[in-house]
Image (cartoon, rainbow, N blue to C red):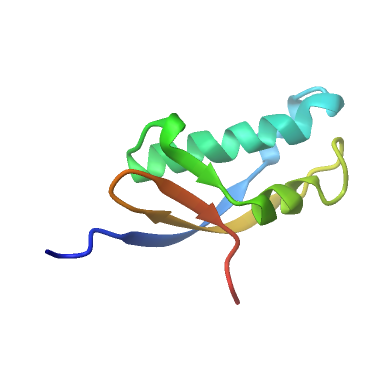
Amino acid sequence: MVDDEIERFYTISFGKLKNIPRTQRAPRAIKHIREFAARHMKAEEEDIWIDHRVNEMVWARGKKKLPSRIRVKIIKFEDVVEVLPPEE
């Protein structure tokens, strides 16, 4: 059987999250990553798994100061979608 694995690289922008209250930006960014991955990989939000290193990339400057964008690698398996940092 053919391995049904899709691997893509994306740049996720956090520009619109600047309108969110400052104390809610990092938690909302994680939710935004989950929604982005679900939309682009055609999966349910419950099936999205975000790696702890991506979480650390978002939270690196604290709760209030998000990076303007992050680069991620999204891999879709049969039943789960993984969001990982790009290995460069």
Who's the residue at 22% across and 64% down the image?
3
Does residue 77 lie above or below 66 as drawn?
below
x, y percent for residue 8: 41, 61
x, y percent for residue 79: 32, 43
User: In which quarter of the view is residue 85 placed?
Assistant: bottom right
Quadrant of the image containing the C terminus: bottom right
User: In which quarter of the view is residue 2 placed?
Assistant: bottom left
Residue at the far left in the pictured view: 1
Counting labels gives 0
User: In which quarter of the view is residue 11 placed?
Assistant: bottom right
x, y percent for residue 77: 33, 53
x, y percent for residue 40: 39, 44
Closer to us: 78 or 40 = 78
Who's the residue at 66% across and 52% down the image?
54
Left or right, 76 with respect to 88, comes to: left
Closer to us: 50 or 58 = 50
Left or right, 85 with respect to 74, comes to: right
Does residue 9 lie above or below 87 as drawn?
above
Closer to us: 32 or 50 = 50
Left or right, 13 with respect to 8, comes to: right
Who's the residue at 38% across and 62% down the image?
7
Does residue 61 lie above or below 4 as drawn?
above
Residue at the far top in the pictured view: 21
Does residue 3 lie above or below 65 as drawn?
below
Who's the residue at 11% across and 64% down the image?
1
